[in-house]
Amino acid sequence: MFTCFVGTRAQLIKMAPVILEIEKRGLPFNLVFTGQHEETMEQLLNDFGIHAARSYLYRGKEITGIVQMGSWFVRCLWKCLRESDKFVPGPSASSVMLVHGDTFSTLLGAIVGKLKGITVAHIEAGLRSGNIFHPFPEELTRRAVFRLSDLAFCPGAWPYDNMKRYRAKRIDTGQNTLLDTLAIALAVPQKSAPPYPMNTYGIVSLHRFENIFYVRRLAQIINLLETAAVRFPLVFVLHPATRKKLAQFDLLSKLESNPRIKLLPRMGYIEFVKLMQGAKFVITDGGSNQEELSYLGIPTLLMRKATERQEGLETTATLCPYDEKILERFMRDLADAPTVIPAIGSSSPSEMIVNQLESYVQTRRDSHS
């Protein structure tokens, strides 16, 4: 039995092609939602056509604060241990806990897997920024999960090499599962027109803890966005936590009153991909966005001090540690940005992961028989 802990939209988006491959092969599978994100999760399941059996550790208000996060984590862990058979199968040769990425749900799943005595398989393992404070707390979460993992599915040679000092068995999948997810989204026909003519607008997507939980940092970013909006109109897609902090710090009205910045609620993944396809550029703090946009060949300004990913850094992505000069240079250079051929269409990392999981489980069964 494969069990997968999913807490955030980004995790479900990247795990979707793996789940679909498991479903296609008819392998026993259980999807456990931890409830970090609630909004649009059902929409994502419908968008990707996922039918796996699923259970819920938490169903309630979306987790948007640190205190709320701590309480949620303890409650979910306690519920898992108290009702463990309901969420996670007992130890056996074929029991595998799948966790993804670097969220608290990743850590929760890895801890539960170890306490239950089953194999922990970490997908998207080996990504590192090298700085425990950027991004925080994701970098610390990764390091903890690396130590708890038995299988490490690494999306390329660089993360594969980063895992060499850990005991987990390393598998290089070549690319991230996001490549498969993006291929699925691109195959869906466009349903609605973009808010501005194609190639005339930029997109903003910000949600990371280090950017939105500190008023001075968030105000600094808003000033940079207003500078960017002078050259191109911006479409700011607001995560619930981002909207909450903007309102709390009295910054939301500043954005709402700017005619060059259009605010949109967080949307489904496929809809967001279509919005990105029409954009001239994207300003984001998301690692997944950095990777997606490198595949699509769209110029990207990373609003953060460090990134754990290599994708796009020599081609599409520019790291901007809140520096106005870097932002202004990025905006000036957009006209001369090189065209990057999308990487869609290469071999499927999701198929490779499921092949490896099947082989691993069969080997363990044979050794126990």
Image: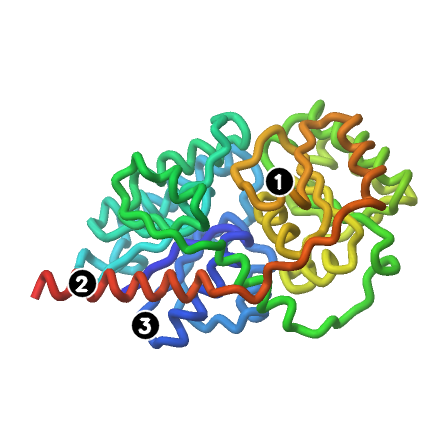
The Cα atoms of the two marked residues, 3 and 2, are separated by 16 Å
Mark 1 crowd level (few <14, some 14–19, many ≥20, 10 Å Cα): some
Q: Along the line of sight, which residue is nearer the eye, 295 or 306?
A: 295
Residue type at mark 2: give it: Thr
**Hey, which quadrant is residue 74 in on the image?**
top left
* Residue denoted by label 1: 313
**Residue depicted at x 59% and y 49%:** 291
Contact between marks 1 and 2 (CB within 8 A): the answer is: no
The one of 53 and 48 positioned closer to us in this rendering = 48
Which amino acid, mark 1?
Leu
Q: Is residue 118 above or below residue 51?
A: above
> What amino acid is at disc 3?
Leu
Which residue of the protein is positioned furthest toward the top in this rendering?
216
Say whether disc 3 or disc 1 marks the residue closer to the N-terminus.
3
Using the numbered discs, state the Cα–Cα distance from disc 3 to disc 1 in whole angstroms. Answer: 38 Å
Position of the N terminus, as image quadrant, is bottom left
